[in-house]
Image (spheres, rainbow, N blue to C red):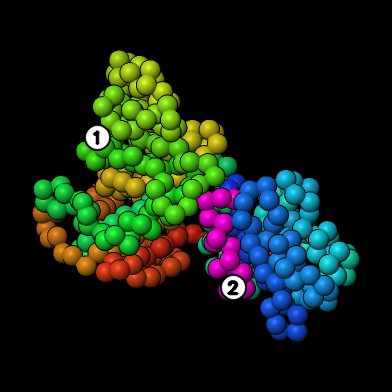
Amino acid sequence: MGRALDLAVRGWGRVAPNPLVGAVVLQGGTVVGEGFHAEFGEPHAEVVALAAAGARARGATVVVTLEPCAHHGKTPPCTDALIAAGVTRVVAAIRDPDPEARGGAEVLRAKGVAVTFGVLAERAAALNAPFLFARAQAERPFVALKLATSIDARIADAHGSSRWVSGEAAREYVQWLRAGFDAIAVGGTTALRDDPQLTVRGPITPRRPPVRVVFDRRAMLNETANLVKTARDMPTWVMASADAPVGSVALLERSGVRVFRPASLADGLRMLRGAGIHSVLCEGGGALGAKLLAEGLVDRLYWVQAPVWLGEGAVPAFPGVAGAPLPEAPRWIPVERRAMGPDTLLVLDRRLCLPES
């Protein structure tokens, strides 16, 4: 199952809105085929793995990260391929919560194929957290917050300089990370100060470029900003308030920016979901990230910690987030820890989106 999960990640940025899925075919304890879902609309992981196994799939066990689908979508049901190949057992990490695709276990069992769930289930759920969240929560997108901080949780020095807190390896990782989200968001002050492009410039070309979203209550961006200058080439949306200056909003709209007028941060996220955004990667600044955290709107934290100490006068990463007594403080779920050059990546989930078996 660990190998199947490693394979599944290879579909990052290319399969959404489908889930990331990997599969391994075992014959007598020996791997005879493996595969992953590589591209939206192309064969699913089980079909690829069965094709690699060929005749050796008969009587084999298929280990897969998600329940095989039982419906006709862009491709035929994976259950049909498993039955036709003569597989005798399927071990799946988690159930598929999608109401259209689920039910594969029952189809397989009806044909005499043994099906079990639960192997590395938590890891599989973490891998597809945005997909699972989208099917359990219709109100807003899955929100991930990315922070690069010093050891003492500062995002910039006392002069406001943040380039670069983290090292090159961490910055390359962020480019990879962006490819797997429907939208990349920043606050208005960050958009003005840093003049970012918010594009994917890493090894993966996403199937659909992420929408660039700026939470800018006053609609402060102007025609000189990179995000505005390129709005007709790359989708760019601004979340302004109802009292944003009419002239500023008109300028943005003339430049090709889509402007929303939410009543609150949570309302803005609801509008994004209504516009087809299922996952958002927020990259700052500190005020927006802290507000999302304070309002309980962050589902995952990608925290890059650099081995530098910026001290008391530096800009804190979590301003205004209320404290709590230790026994009542929320404890997040560690998903991943790893070194990135001199830096350390810590990935934390606020909750586990684990489908019922």
* Front-most of residues 179 and 334: 179
Mark 1, residues whose alpha carbon is within 10 Å: few (<14), some, or many (≥20)?
some
Query: Outermost residue, bottom direction?
Result: 28
Dot label at residue 3: 2
Q: Distance between the residues labelled 1 and 2?
A: 44 Å
Mark 2, residues whose alpha carbon is within 10 Å: few (<14), some, or many (≥20)?
some
Residue hosting label 1: 192
Q: Is residue 158 visible?
A: yes
User: Residue at left 26%, top 53%?
Assistant: 318
Q: Position of residue 141 (x, y in %)?
A: 50, 44
Q: Where is residue 320 in the image (x, y as percent from the top left)?
A: 25, 48
Magenta stretch contains residue 8: yes
Magenta segment main secondary structure: helix
User: Residue at left 39%, top 48%?
Assistant: 201
User: In the rendered view, would you say 306 is above or below 13?
Assistant: below
Left or right, 164 with reference to 159 = right
Q: Which quadrant, please, contains the N terminus? A: bottom right
Dot label at residue 315: none
Q: Which of marks 1 and 2 is nearer the N terminus?
A: 2
SS class, disc 1: helix
Q: Position of residue 138 (x, y in %)?
A: 58, 42
Q: Position of residue 290 (x, y in %)?
A: 30, 48
SS class, disc 2: helix
As shown in the figure, which amino acid type bears the numbered disc 2? Answer: Arg
The picture quadrant where one finds residue 60 is: bottom right
User: Residue at left 45%, top 60%?
Assistant: 349
Q: Give the range drawn in magenta.
A: 1-15
Magenta stretch contains residue 332: no
User: Residue at left 36%, top 42%?
Assistant: 198
